[in-house]
Image (cartoon, rainbow, N blue to C red):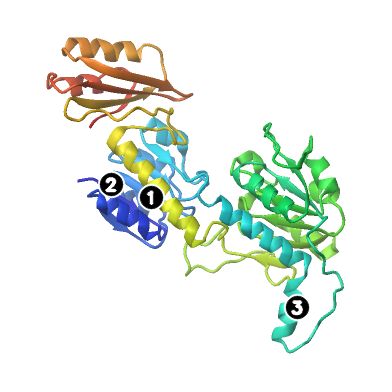
Amino acid sequence: MLKALLLENIHPNAIKLLRDHSVELECLKEGLTENDLIARLDGVDILGIRSRTHVTQRVLERSDHLLAIGAYCIGTNQIDLDAASLKGIAAFNAPYSNTRSVAELVIAETIFLLRRLYDKILNAHQGIWDKSAENAREVRGKKLGIIGYGNIGSQVSMLAESMGMDVYYYDVVDKLTIGNATRTRTLHELLAVAEVVTIHVDGNSSNTNLIDEREFTVMKDGVLLLNLSRGHVVNLEALRKNLESGKIAGAALDVFPVEPKDANERFVTPLQNYPNVLLTPHIGGSTEEAQENIAEFVTLKLLEYIRTGNTFTSVNFPKINAPKSDDALSHRLMHVHQNVPGVLSQINGIFAKNNVNVLTQYLRTNELIGYVIADVDREYKDSLFDDLKHVGHTIKVRIV
């Protein structure tokens, strides 16, 4: 029986799907430290995490039984993907499932900041009837600058344009423009024109302090800044300084360089107690709809990989989408190896040695590894599996 460990309170739909496929489960509400994770992974085939648990090289080196990791979120920077590849462990995420939820929160927070609702709400709670329209503005006609025009950034673009905003975007990769958005050639060109800036880049270390003192200098006076991407993207001390000077009129942050491991750990940031700063606890994708979609998508991809070897949506394995084999007639063999010349030739030599009739065969490689799926007749020598394990540069062999 397969065994799965699910951490960080993953949605019940994932639990139901795994149990429906006869997977033994251990579920925890919290994330785990490196040492605790190593201890818990003994005998585990499938690991499910969100953003707080870090799957390091050390964890992976000590997880000989692990076959696959599911990141029940968009980002995968909490997983050492290269180390996972070299251990023959496939990783999957949910790149689209919470896109709408994050985009809607961006629009909601933009309206909240432009209307200065934080002042109105606080005053009303204190018994002050403040009906002044001073500094309260509509979103219509405002210039929105989107940094990162991927799945979420482009969705924000569509929603913002439908509300009458003028959309500008910057991305390091050529992207198809949606609607009437305008692409800028450089980040600073975008910052110089935008009245609202929202960030939607990935967790690559090269994005550390992407928005720093120099970028704040380029921005227009009174700009609003939103970051629902990664905590290390914005220099928080520089942001605090520019909030206090009035250069930045307001900000909304959903991600932080250091986040609590669970609800019992106190959250601290230099931006607390500023009325014009909206702080949310990494909930951009935390809607019922998004979590249901993520739970179903990631779990089904994990199960598909375990049962068929398909890796079309994997974030670290070569992408193979092999048709379903006929279990009554064939067995499916999967061979993961370092990406060096000659491995497939060795594998085919072993098939010939063991009188194996190969029905279909697929090979894909990436920078680190090669991945072979082969459907073979059910009749073959018992020595086949051991022979495949001893092919030079082999990482992992499976038969289903």
- Which residue shows up at 70% across the image and 72% down it? 273
**SS at circle 2:** loop
Do the residues under discs 2 and 3 have CB atoms within 8 angstroms? Answer: no
Residue type, numbered disc 2: Val
Left/right of residue 395 with respect to residue 276 in the rendered view: left
Give the number of the disc on residue 120. Answer: 3
* Residue for point 80% across, 58% down: 140
Marks 2 and 1, how far apart in space?
11 Å
Badge 2 or badge 3: first in the primary sequence: 2
Which numbered tag is attached to residue 48? Answer: 1
- Which picture quadrant has residue 15? bottom left
What's under tag 1, amino acid-wise?
A: Gly
Q: Nearer the viewer, residue 178 or 18?
A: 178
The C terminus appears in which quarter of the rendering? top left
In the image, residue 349 lies at what x, y percent? 25, 10
> For numbered disc 1, what is the local secondary structure?
strand
Question: How far from the left and from the top, in percent, is residue 30?
Answer: 41, 61
Question: Answer yes or no: do the residues labelled 2 and 1 have beta carbons within 8 Å?
Answer: no
Instruction: Residue at 41% x, 16% y: name it.
Output: 340
Sooner in the amino-acid sequence: mark 3 or mark 1: 1
* Residue 229 shows up from this direction: yes
Q: Nearer the viewer, mark 2 or mark 3?
A: 3
Q: Position of residue 348 (x, y in %)?
A: 27, 12
Residue 44, numbered label: 2
Residue sitting farthest toward the bottom: 127
What's the CA distance linking mark 2 and mark 3?
52 Å
User: Residue flagged by tag 3: what amino acid is it?
Assistant: Lys
Q: CA distance from mark 3 to mark 1?
A: 42 Å
Write down the quadrant of residue 195 in the picture.
bottom right
Query: Mark 3 or mark 1: which is in front?
Result: 3
Classify mark 2: residues with Cα within 10 Å, few (<14), some (14-19) or many (20+).
Answer: many
**Do the residues bearing badges 3 and 1 touch, measured as CB atoms within 8 Å?**
no
